[in-house]
Amino acid sequence: MKSPNIIFILSDQQRFDSLGCYGQKLNVSPNIDKIAAEGVKFEYAFTNQPVCGPARSILQTGKYATETGCYRNGIALSINEKTLAKSFSQEGYEVGYLGKWHLASTSGRSKDIKLERVKNTITPIPEQYRGGYKNYWLASDLLEFTSNAFDGHLFDKHNKKIDFKGYRVDCLTDFALEYLSMRDNSKPLFFFISFLEPHQQNDQNAIIGPEGSKEKFKNYDVPGDLEGMGGDWKEFYSDYLGCCYSVDHNVGRIIDKIEELNMEENTIIIFSSDHGCHFRTRNFEYKRSCHDASIHIPLIIKGLEFKGGKRISKLVSLINLPPTLYECAGIPIPKYMKAKPLQQLLNDNSQNWSDDVFIQISETQVGRAIRTPKWKYSVESPNKDGILYSRSEIYRGAFLYDLETDPYEKQNLIAEPEFINVRKELSSLLKQKMIEAGENLPNIIIE
């Protein structure tokens, strides 16, 4: 059997509940909803690191962010890492990448990791920092710095500046469709498409939807975690949904091109996001917290065995995706990958599935968290800066939520005496997960 084509579409900072298949009532995502109806939807998918660069390092390597060294933004992925693209290329795949990369620049200091400055933030990315994507490359390390919502530029594999004008996600999709149409399809394809939307535009400190978004999506139901909270969701949520609508529209364009090229029967489509968005309700920015608004992401896969409109309710995370992709391509899964492929959940073979997710949090804190079907438990270092340090020897409890009775995480139980045994149990589980991720056994202060 011919190896399948694999097209991975990643949005940036997209909440799971922005999609109709996850409960959004407005007509935001008809194309992605159709993929979910025909493929497999993972009800409870999470990021293992709610910030852009670290999450992307997980996706490209199958390792936790502290294992790759990319524990925060502004740390380049080591050129020696074995990545998806390198592995797929060795197995005869054509490998391509389009959009935001965010793994080619190192800035600032770290007090527990040796860093060497690498400056590719707004310049062409040298080949050795492209993670092995050698056949097609059209990217910018920080796309939000080389473009705004309606124009900008990327760099191709020859370091040539490629300008675009129009709504950004539309223009990136134009490039994707051109590539799909022009390539020699004698080889199977692994194509990673990395959109920036619905991430805010950093230089304007705003979420910018396509024209008409505010009016088109003004009648939204307020998500439960935002209701009654501060932040800036009232100002930006309509435009945020407009961004999500544009992502969906362009996913539809990609699907149409796949069908036009007669690739559909042997192509696997993955749609997900790097993290969510809490609209400054939990801290001073949009993610970097343990809350589901930050970590709960969409994950939908269609193609080959991912079919039939299945709904998987087991907890999964980004770190499951690299071994899943290897399995899709028939490539042996490297032994250093600790996570299991999602194929194990398709045929009710889930008796040995660990139904919890381990999260590392950086920049706003040196934090760790565990998410189970019922509980959310988060700890943070009492004395270490989340930019300067990747880990700590001592942590103190920060948040405990009973997700069955408090799904929107409004009542923090971390100091309630009646939950001391719950905290002890979750602390033990969290320590186990930290050790599995290559960290040293910490001291977690339980009060």
Image (cartoon, grey):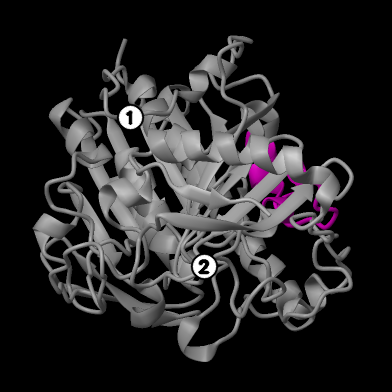
Distance Cα–Cα, label 2 vs label 1: 31 Å
Q: Is residue 44 among what the camera can see?
A: no
Q: Quadrant of the N terminus?
A: top left
Which residue is rendered at x = 71% and y = 79% of the image? 236
Q: Left or right? Give the position of 25 relative to 422.
A: right
The amino acid on which the numbered mark 2 sits, given as a three-letter code, is Pro
What is the x, y in percent for residue 37? 70, 31
| Crowd band around label 2 with a 10 angstrom C-alpha radius: few (<14), some (14–19), many (20+) | some
What is the x, y in percent for residue 420? 75, 44
Q: Left or right? Give the position of 243 relative to 63.
A: right
Q: Secondary structure at mark 2?
A: loop
Q: Left or right? Give the position of 192 relative to 288.
A: left
Can you tell which mark lies on residue 337?
A: 1
Above or below for 204 versus 152: below
Which residue is rendered at x = 20% and y = 64% of the image? 156
Which residue is rendered at x = 68% and y = 58% of the image? 293
Precedes in sequence: disc 2 or disc 1: 1
The amino acid on which the numbered mark 1 sits, given as a three-letter code, is Met
Examine the structure image and report whether residue 19 is included in the region drawn in magenta.
yes
Above or below for 447 versus 41: below
Quarter-of-image position of residue 339: top left
Residue segment shown in magenta: 16-35
Q: Nearer the viewer, mark 2 or mark 1?
A: 2
Prevailing secondary structure of the magenta residues: helix
Q: Secondary structure at mark 1?
A: loop
Examine the structure image and report whether residue 325 is included in the region drawn in magenta.
no
Above or below for 156 versus 131: below
State if disc 1 and disc 2 touch (CB < 8 Å). no
Above or below for 409 versus 180: below
Can you tell which mark lies on residue 382?
A: 2
Residue 229 versus residue 130: which sits nearer the camera?
229
